[in-house]
Amino acid sequence: MIKRQEWIILLAALGIVSCLMLLKPAGAAPAGGPYHFGFKKSVGGALPSIKEEGFQTILQQHGAIFLGDTKQRELYLTFDNGYENGYTPGILDVLKAKGVPAIFFVTGHYVKDKPELVKRMAAEGHLIGNHSWSHPDMSVISNGQIGMELAKVKTAVADLTGQKDMPFLRPPRGIFSDRVLAVSKEQGYTSVFWSIAYRDWEPSAQRGWKYAYDNVMAQLHPGAVILLHSVSKDNADALGRIIDAAREQGYTFRALNELESKTY
């Protein structure tokens, strides 16, 4: 049986532990990750921020992209293409008509399922980026598996399009760690995140072109890397309007390989 004095000591110890747990942020990732990419959105023209996310130093150390040059009214348009939902042809039509470059991050499923669209992306001057072969959480697979995931996409795209270089990677699901960025960098990739995004990836939760337009335009800022999912009908319908409105505000759309200055 525990004596009264021993109970007092035990309860005191538990109290100290509870206080220490309160001091540690809930759900805080250990040093080095894994992390789910997130950021403080731009509001009213103010720049977005990752200063409180816990991974700013890691992105900077590995040369990952969050923002371009925030002193220039330039925008970088990026699309995630995990699978095709019927809207990429229309997106490509708009980009061609408006003379806007983009980068499409493709998975192995996309390359196998829609080879003609991958060919069209390259033929029309767009960049094709790596989004991994099977879209895994790369923070839980080995270095060798990461290498295979990336190599399979690069080889498949090269076989289709003749594009030998593939310098840009978007980590699947936005999940990464210090190790993932380091291994990817060793493979020759710059990891690309984003500074404008909204919940657009659910085909069953589309709310009309104006919803997409308002979400993107409300966050617009110099040096922005815009993430859009190509499975979204809202995005496809709003894209031309977004491009026109951004240009009216003095913005220029540039290809990601023209990004010369990174901001964190």
Image (tube, grey):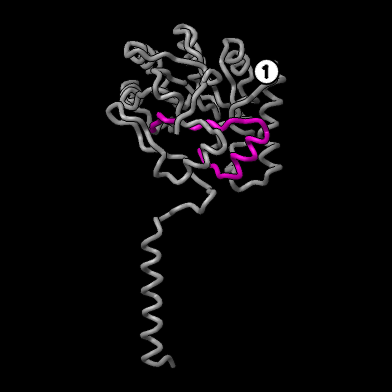
Question: x, y percentage for residue 57?
Answer: 49, 42
Q: Which corner quadrant of the image does residue 249 belong to?
A: top left
Magenta region, residue range: 173-198
Vertical position of residue 145 compared to residue 113: above or below: below
Q: Image quadrant for the C terminus? A: top left
For disc 1, the marked residue is: 163
Residue at image coords 42%, 23%: 223
Q: Which corner quadrant of the image does residue 121 belong to?
A: top right
In this rendering, position of residue 55 left or right of residue 155: left
Residue 228 visible in this rendered orientation of the protein: no
Vertical position of residue 177 compared to residue 197: above or below: below
Residue 219 visible in this rendered orientation of the protein: yes
Residue at image coords 61%, 10%: 123
Residue 97 highlighted magenta (yes or no): no
Residue at image coords 47%, 27%: 229
Residue 178 highlighted magenta (yes or no): yes
In this rendering, position of residue 181 left or right of residue 85: right
* Residue that protrudes farthest toward the top in the picture: 97
Question: x, y percentage for residue 105?
Answer: 56, 26
Vertical position of residue 7 compared to residue 206: above or below: below
Front residue of 90/263: it is 263
Question: x, y percentage for residue 174?
Answer: 50, 38
